[in-house]
Amino acid sequence: MTIGQIINQVRENDPQADADLLQLAYEFADKAHKGQKRMNGEPYIQHSLHTAFLLAQMKADLTIIIAGILHDVPEDTEVTLEEIEKNFGQDVASLVHGITKLGKIKYRGVERYRENLRKMFLAMAEDLRVILIKFCDRLHNLRTLDALPTEKRQRIARETLEIYAPIAGLLGIWRLKWQMEDLCFKYLYPEEFKKLLYKYEVEKKVERNQYIQKVKNTLGKKLSEAGIDYQVEGRFKHLYSIYKKMQLKDRKFDEILDVFALRIIVPSIPDCYKTLGIIHTIWKPKVGRIKDYIAVPKPNGYRSLHTTVFGIDNQPTEFQIRTEEMNEESHYGIAAHWYYKQRSGSDYHEERQPAWVKEILNILKQENEDKDFIKEIKLDIFHDRIFVFSPKGDVFDLPEDSTPIDFAYAVHTEIGNKAIGALVNNKMVPLDHPLKNGDLTEIIIDKRRKGPSRDWLKFVKTNRAKEKITHFTNESKFASFKKIFPKI
Ligand code: MN
C-alpha cells in the first residue's frame, strides 16, 4: 500500500482534497515508525496506510483519514500527541488520542469483556469517528492475524466477534461488520468455516449463479421495457451470517441457502416502488414478507424495499430494492450518512448522532462506573445472541433463551451429559432456566450420572445440545438392544 493509492482513493470522492496534507501525514508517520516491523515482517507504516485506505474507501473525510495514518504514533513511538497537534491541528490530535485511550485494557476474562464494551461506548459517546478508525484498524489487524501466536489470535478474534462486529452492526456499517465476522469465523471455528465455504463457494455456486442469471433475464427485460436503469447483485450473503442463521433457526444449511437473494439497484425512489410492482406482477409475493424500509427506515438508518416471492420453479427468492445512495449507506451506515450530508451542504456535525446513539449517551451519562454496565445498557446490541460466562471467565456465544444445558454442552459434551444442576450468578436455577446476556453460569455435575435426559430436548435451544442428547439416548437404547441381541 502506498500513500499514492490513498490519495487517489480520496480524490475519487473529493477531487479538491488536500493531497499535500496527506503526503505530510504519511511522511510524519513513516518517520515516527521508522525501523518498526509488524509481526508478519512488514514495515509498521503498512498497517497505518491500510487503516487509512479502508477509511478512504468508506468515504471518510480528510481529518479521519489523517488520524488513521497517525493512529499508532503516540502509542508506539517517541513522537507525542502534542507534536501531532502542532502539525495537524487539534481535531486530528483528539481523534488519535481517542484511539490511544481505547487501546489499553489490562483486565482478563469477564472484566476484560466488560471494560472493552464500556470503553467502546464511551469512545462512541465522545466522538463516533474514533470508532470508525478503530474498526478499520481492527479489520487490518484481523487480516494479518496469521502472524500472531494462537492464543492472542483467538482472543482478538473473539473480542472482535463479541464487541466490534455487533457495534458495527448497530452503526449500520455492514461492510466492516461482515468482513470482521467472516475473518473471526475462520479463526474461531475453522472446521465449520471450511465446511460452509466449500458448500457455498463450490457445491452451491453453480446452481445459485444459474438461477440468478435466469431471474436477471426475466426481470431485466421487464425493467428495460419500463425504462428503468438497473444493476443486479447476486452475492451478498456472508458465511458467518449463514452460520448464525443455521444455529439460531435450527435449520440445515440447504434450507437457508435455498432462499436465493438478489439486490436490485435503481436510480430513484419512484423506480424502487415501480420495480417492486414489476417483480410482483411476474412472481407471487409471500404474504408478510414485503417490507418498506424506505417509508419507515430501520433505527440505524437502513433503507430498502424487501420482498420474498415464489420465483422461477416456485423457488423462494428474496429481493432488496434500493437506490445507489441507499446502497452506499447500507454498506457504510453512519459513515456514508456523513458523506452525503456533507455533500449536500448541510451541517453534518449536527446530524452525526442518530437518535439511538443519543439514547445510549444519555444512559451513559447517568451511569456510574461501578454499576453493571451490560445490564444497564437498555439497547439490544446483540440481537438474538447472548454471551454467557463460565467461572473461568470464558465467554460462550449462545442463541437467546438458551438454558444451562445448552451452556453445559457448549463447554464440553461430558459436562452436558453429567449435568444435574446449575448456578446462575451464584444462585441455584432449574436446568431449563433461560439465560441472559452476561450471566455467570456454573454447571454442577454428578460423575456417576449415566447420561442426559430425553426430556431436555423439550427446552434446549442449540443444535449442539439437541444432537448430543439425541445421540446419547439413541446410543444407550442401542446399547440395551445389544444386550438383548448381542450379535448385532
Ligand atoms: Mn493500529
Image (cartoon, rainbow, N blue to C red):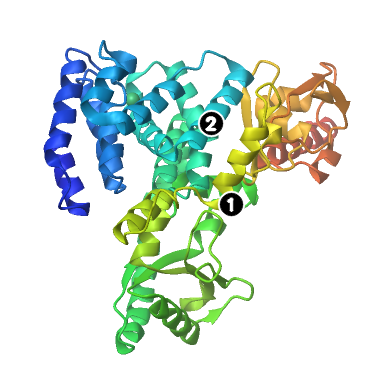
Q: What amino acid type should be assigned to the residue bearing mark 2?
A: Leu
Q: What amino acid type should be assigned to the residue bearing mark 1?
A: Lys
Q: Is residue 393 shown above or below 181?
A: above
Residue 475 appearing in the image: no
Toward the viewer: 483 or 448?
Answer: 448
Q: Is residue 52 shown above or below 289?
A: above
Q: In the rendering, which numbered label is found on residue 122? A: 2
Q: How many marks?
A: 2
Side of 220 relative to 486 (left or right):
left
Q: Residue at x 58, y 49 (%)?
A: 356
Q: Nearer the viewer, mark 1 or mark 2?
A: 2
Badge 1 marks a residue whose secondary structure is loop
**Residue 71 sits in quarter:** top left
Judge the density around disc 1: few (<14), some (14-19), many (≥20) Cα neighbours within 10 Å.
Answer: few
Pointer 1: what residue? 252
Badge 2 marks a residue whose secondary structure is helix
